Amino acid sequence: MEIANVIEEVAVNLLRLAVIELPSDVKEAIRKAYNEETSEAGKTQLKAILDNIELAEKTQKPMCQDTGTIIFYIKAGVEAKGLDKIPQALKNATLRATKEVPLRPNAVDPFLQKNSGDNTGRYIPYIHWEIVPGNTIEVTALPKGGGSENVTVLGMLVPGQGVRGLKKFVIDAIMRAGAKPCPPNILGIGVGGGADIAVKLAKQALLRPLNQPNPNPEIAKLEKELFEAANMTGIGPMGLGGKCTVLGVNIEYAHRHPASYPAAVAFQCWAARRATAKIHTDGKVEYLTHKV
């Protein structure tokens, strides 16, 4: 089978998996939150979320009516063949998944205000490329919901405030977001680079599983501190109060210019949809986030 056909089939499967079944690390975090929640209202909301997750898997229907804007992350081995076929294959997969899963059409022309009706359009599905050693192709589908996307923030902080200023920026963002991003949330935090780099890193941070600590011990410590501070806000599940406002905090960073300190916070709702597969040169497909 041609690589384009393999990628198309895999991408359709990834979109189906992403919108129907949460990765195990997210489900585990939600169950842990339910067991630890002390607020009656918060516990009720978490129980409803867990029931919803179970029903989605049982009926093989999307867990939320908002199936997101379609984003793909590609790790392309430098020796892999057919890389030029990937964009069209991912578009074809999006068209198919919209009908077959189905996915709600979420691609709207910002000037004409017209929905394409098939989740494709200018730069959509959006593709992030990364060239890596080897000959495999790793594909990640991230259907990003609108509610959590709407509270994403970028700030150009004062360099002299350093990490102290970053902490304040993150907690302020959580307080302003409140119930809008359907908490409990996952926070992706991007720091450094430039404005565009910080936002890109923040969303990329959402791809790291919640049960994988940051490899940098100092940043892992900061993630834990922000996690604990966020859960002291009292916003709680669905904003109805409680101790579980976030499920996890992931940080990615780049070195910055001496005169600037860009930082971004990307929110992901509890329906943290992502699915990843690796395609080998012999056509073998290895699903990394789900059992298939």
Image: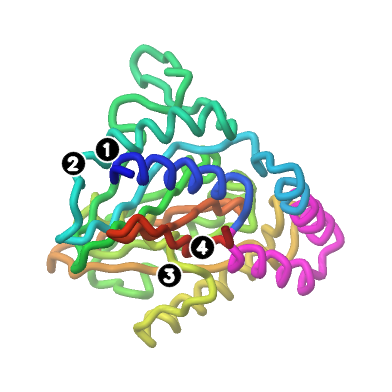
Q: Give whichever of 186, 257 is nearer the camera.
A: 186
* Residue type at the position of mark 4: Thr
- Residue drawn at (56%, 54%), measured in percent from left and top? 272
For the residues carrying marks 1 and 3, which lies nearer the camera in this image? Answer: 1
Q: CA distance from mark 1 to mark 3?
A: 38 Å
Query: Which callout, 4 or 2, points at the residue further toward the start of the chain?
Result: 2
Q: Is residue 51 magenta?
A: yes
For the residues carrying marks 2 and 3, which lies nearer the camera in this image? Answer: 2
- Residue drawn at (68%, 39%), measured in percent from left and top? 61
- Where residue 115 appears, x then y in whole percent? 45, 17
Query: Which callout, 4 or 1, points at the residue further toward the start of the chain?
Result: 1
Query: Which callout, 2 or 3, points at the residue further toward the start of the chain?
Result: 2
* Residue type at the position of mark 3: Lys
For the residues carrying marks 4 and 2, which lies nearer the camera in this image? Answer: 2
- In the image, taking residue 240 as reference, residue 229 lies left or right, namely left
- In the image, taking residue 260 as reference, residue 186 lies left or right, namely right
User: Above or below — where is 86 with respect to 54?
Assistant: above
- Residue drawn at (24%, 72%), measured in percent from left and top? 160
User: Above or below — where is 185 with respect to 180?
Assistant: below
Q: Are discs 1 and 3 less than 8 Å apart at CB? A: no
Helix, strand or loop under label 3:
helix
